[in-house]
Image: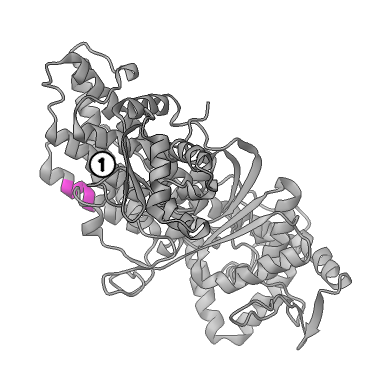
C-alpha cells in the first residue's frame, strides 16, 4: 500500500472545497506554514484566484473555509486578511495519518519499477589513487541512487572509468623503459602472457606520475606515449594484455576505497567500452548530415536560437582522427540506451563541465541516439574548499588522497570519543569509523550540491549543531530509551500511537508526517541537502520533546506507550534517511 503524502491529503480536501465554491482547483495548493507560531499548514490560493474571479481574496477564502470548517481533519481553520487560509489539523487526524505512515513509511513513492534511471557518477582514472576531487561525485551520486531507488525506480549506476586515454600510453611507455624485457613489448612473442601483473598497485601509482611529469618536458617520450595509446586502441596484443593488468590491479584498489565510503556501482564500465560504437556513430552523424568538417576536425552544431550565451559546436573527432570525451560520452549513451533503455539520465559531475554535457545532450537528442521522451540531467557540483576558501589541499600543498582524508577524520572522531567516554580502544575505533563517515558525508551533502563549501573537520565532527554526529547521537539516544523501556518487560506497539495533550509530541508527529513529502522533493530536485535539513529539524523536534517530556518515568502507561511508539517511528525514519544519504548509525556513542 502506498501511503499518501500529508500535503496531498490536505490538498485533496481543498480541491473539493475550491471546486465546490465554483473556483478552479489549481488554486487549492496547501503548503507547510512558514509561521508555525500561527498555524501548521496554509493555503494562499485565494490571493491568486482573486484576480481571475474579480473578487476580494478574503471573500473567496471565507467561502472555502465555510466548506471545510466542519471537517474532522481540522482542529482550526480560518481566513486571515487579506485572504490567507491558516489551519491546524486535529489530534485524531494526525494520529490516523501517523499510524498509516508507521506501517508504510518505507514503501516506494511511485509504482515505477519498470522505468529505468541511469546514473553516471564516480569517474576516476584508472592507475591513479582516488583523491578528494572524487569525493563529491561519489557521495552525491550514491545518495541520488539510493533516493531514486527508494522512490520506486529501477536504477542502474555506472562508475564510468577513465581507462582509454593518453594515461594508458604513458604507463605503457614508462613501464617499457623500466622493464624492457617484459613479453608485452616483444612483438614476436606468441605464447600466453603471465597471469600476474608485473607491478603492485603502489608501483602502478608511482609509474603514472613519473610518466606524466616526463611527458611535459620530453617531447620524444610524449610522442611514444601517443603512439602506444593509438596501438592499444587498435588492439595491439601485448598492450591489450598489459592494459588488462592495469585494469585489474586498479579496480581492486578502487573498489576497496569506494567500499570505505559505502559507495558501490552496478557497472564498472569505462571509456574503452564505448570504443566499439564510435566508428559507426561518426558515420551515422555524417550520413544524417549533422557532422561537418571544421579546421580538420569533425563537428556538430548544437546552438539554439533561444540560447543566451554562445554554445560552440561539439567536436566529435579531432583532425588526427582521435576521439574526445564527447565522442566516448555519446557512444556510451548508445550502449546504455541499447542495453538499459533509460527514461532518465543523471550525470553527477563537476559543474565546470556543464558546457561539455550541454553539447553532448544536444547531440544525443539531435542525432536521435535516444527516444524523444528521454530526460537528461546534469547535476554539477561545486568545489570542496579549505578554510582559506581555496580548493582543499594537503599541508604540503598537494591533492590529498581520499583514504588519507577518511583516516584523518576517523582519527579526529576517535580522539573525541576517547576523551569523553569510557570505552575500549577496539569499540572506539569501530565507532569512529561509522561516525567519521557520517561526519564526512553529512558535511558534504548538507550543502546544496551546486555550491562550493568549506571542509572543516572540527565543525563536521561536532556532536552538536547541524552535523552528522548530532544526527547519530539522536538515533543512539532513542535506541537507549527504547532499550530501557523494553528491559522493564514492555514492548513497542505501533497501535498505541496517539496524540495526547502534549504540544511537543504533536510537533514531533507533524514533523514525521512530512517525511515522504521531503523524500519526494529530494528525488524530484536531485537534492540530498533537503533530506539533511529534514533530519536535522526532526532531530531538533525530537530532542525538544525528550527534554520537555518524562518518557521512562511517565506513570500513565497508555501515554508512555504512545510516547515510545512515536519515538520508535522517529528512529526508524531517521535510520531510513541516513541510509538514503549513504551512512549508518552505531549502537552506542
> What SS does tag 1 mark?
helix
Looking at the rendering, which quadrant does residue 276 occupy? bottom right
Q: Nearer the viewer, residue 586 or 62?
A: 62
- The magenta span reads 412-416
Q: Mark 1 points at which residue?
A: 539
Examine the residues drawn in magenta and state their main secondary structure: helix
The question of residue 414 being in magenta is answered with yes
The question of residue 324 being in magenta is answered with no
User: Would residue 344 be found to the left or right of residue 441 on screen?
Assistant: right
Looking at the rendering, which quadrant does residue 63 occupy? top left
Say if 72 sits above or below 266 in the image: above
Q: Nearer the viewer, residue 429 or 346?
A: 346
Where is residue 452? Give x, y as percent: 38, 68
User: Would residue 208 be found to the left or right of residue 306 on screen?
Assistant: left
Q: Nearer the viewer, residue 197 or 148?
A: 148
Where is residue 99? Give x, y as percent: 37, 24
Q: How many marks?
A: 1
Q: Which part of the image, by quadrant, shows the C terminus? A: top left
Where is residue 425? Give x, y as percent: 19, 39
Crowd class of label 1 (few under 14; some 14 to 19; many from 20; radius 10 Å): many
Looking at the rendering, which quadrant does residue 47 occupy? bottom left
Res. 534 visible in picture: yes
Where is residue 287? Give x, y as percent: 89, 70
The residue sitting at the top extreme is: 489
User: Would residue 276 be found to the left or right of residue 87 on screen?
Assistant: right
Say if 377 sits above or below 486 in the image: below
Q: Which of 248 and 295 is in front in this view?
A: 295
Res. 582 visible in picture: no
Task: Name the residue at 30% across, 63% down.
Answer: 455
Amino acid at each position: 500500500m502506498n501511503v499518501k503524502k500529508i500535503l496531498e491529503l490536505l490538498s485533496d480536501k481543498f480541491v473539493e472545497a475550491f471546486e465546490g465554491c465554483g473556483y478552479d482547483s489549481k488554486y487549492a495548493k496547501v503548503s507547510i506554514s512558514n509561521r508555525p507560531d500561527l498555524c501548521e499548514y496554509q493555503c494562499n490560493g485565494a490571493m491568486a484566484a482573486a484576480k481571475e474571479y474579480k473578487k476580494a481574496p478574503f471573500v473567496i477564502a471565507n467561502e472555502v473555509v465555510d466548506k471545510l470548517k466542519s471537517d474532522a481533519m481540522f482542529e482550526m481553520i480560518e481566513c486571515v486578511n487579506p485572504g490567507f487560509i491558516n489551519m491546524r489539523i486535529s489530534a485524531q487526524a494526525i494520529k490516523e495519518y501517523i499510524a498509516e505512515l508507521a506501517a508504510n513509511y518505507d514503501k516506494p513513492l511511485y509504482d515505477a519499477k519498470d522505468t529505468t534511471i541511469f546514473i553516471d557518477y564516480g569517474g576516476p582514472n584508472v592507475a591513479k589513487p582516488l583523491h578528494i576531487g572524487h569525493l563529491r561525485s561519489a557521495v552525491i551520486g550514491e545518495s541520488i541512487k539510493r533516493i531514486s531507488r527508494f522512490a520506486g525506480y529501477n536504477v542502474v549506476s555506472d562508475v564510468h572509468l577513465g581507462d582509454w586515454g593518453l594515461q594508458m600510453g604513458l604507463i605503457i611507455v614508462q613501464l617499457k623503459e623500466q622493464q624492457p624485457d617484459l613479453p608485452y613489448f616483444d612483438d614476436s612473442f606468441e605464447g600466453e602472457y603471465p597471469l600476474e601483473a608485473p607491478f603492485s598497485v603502489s608501483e602502478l601509482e608511482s609509474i603514472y606520475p613519473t610518466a606524466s611529469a616526463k611527458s611535459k618536458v620530453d617531447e620524444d617520450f610524449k610522442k611514444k606515449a601517443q603512439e602506444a595509446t593509438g596501438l592499444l586502441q587498435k588492439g595491439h596484443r601485448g598492450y591489450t594484455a598489459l592494459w588488462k593488468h592495469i585494469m585489474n590491479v586498479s579496480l581492486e584498489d578502487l573498489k576497496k576505497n569506494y567500499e570505505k565510503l559505502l559507495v558501490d556501482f552496478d557497472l564498472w564500465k569505462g571509456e574503452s567500452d564505448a570504443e566499439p560504437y564510435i566508428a559507426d556513430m561518426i558515420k551515422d552523424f555524417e550520413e544524417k548530415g549533422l557532422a561537418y568538417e571544421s579546421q580538420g576536425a569533425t563537428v556538430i552544431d548544437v546552438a539554439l536560437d533561444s540560447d543566451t550565451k554562445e554554445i560552440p559546436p561539439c567536436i566529435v573527432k579531432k583532425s588526427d582522427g582521435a576521439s574526445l570525451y564527447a565522442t566516448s560520452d555519446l557512444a556510451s549513451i548508445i550502449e546504455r540506451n541499447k542495453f538499459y533503455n533509460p527514461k532518465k539520465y543523471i550525470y553527477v559531475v563537476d559543474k565546470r563541465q556543464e558546457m561539455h554535457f550541454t553539447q553532448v545532450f544536444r547531440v544525443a537528442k539531435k542525432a536521435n541516439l535516444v527516444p524523444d521522451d528521454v530526460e537528461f540531467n546534469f547535476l554539477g557540483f561545486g568545489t570542496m574548499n579549505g578554510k582559506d576558501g581555496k580548493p582543499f589541499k594537503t599541508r604540503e600543498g598537494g591533492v590529498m588522497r581520499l583514504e588519507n582524508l577518511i583516516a584523518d577524520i576517523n582519527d579526529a572522531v576517535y580522539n573525541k570519543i576517547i576523551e569523553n567516554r569510557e570505552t575500549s580502544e577496539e569499540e572506539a575505533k569501530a565507532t569512529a569509523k561509522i561516525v567519521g563517515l557520517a561526519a564526512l558525508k553529512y558535511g558534504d551533502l548538507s550543502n546544496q550540491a551546486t555550491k562550493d563549501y568549506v571542509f572543516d573537520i572540527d565543525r563536521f565532527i561536532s556532536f552538536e549543531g547541524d552535523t552528522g554526529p548530532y544526527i547519530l547521537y539522536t538515533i543512539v539516544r532513542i535506541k537507549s530509551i527504547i532499550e530501557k523501556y523494553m528491559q522493564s518487560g514492555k514492548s513497542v506497539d505501533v497501535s498505541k500511537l496517539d496524540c495526547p495533550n502534549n504540544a511537543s509530541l504533536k510537533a514531533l508527529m507533524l514533523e514525521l508526517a512530512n517525511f515522504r513529502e521531503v523524500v519526494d522533493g529530494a528525488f524530484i530536485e536531485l537534492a540530498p541537502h533537503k533530506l539533511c535539513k529534514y533530519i536535522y529539524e526532526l532531530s531538533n523536534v525530537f530532542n525538544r520533546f525528550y527534554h520537555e517530556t518524562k518518557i521512562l518515568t511517565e506513570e500513565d502507561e497508555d501515554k508512555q506507550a504512545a510516547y515510545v511508539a512515536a519515538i520508535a517511528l522517529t528512529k526508524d525514519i531517521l535510520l531510513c534517511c541516513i541510509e538514503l544519504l549513504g551512512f549508518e548509525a552505531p549502537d552506542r556513542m
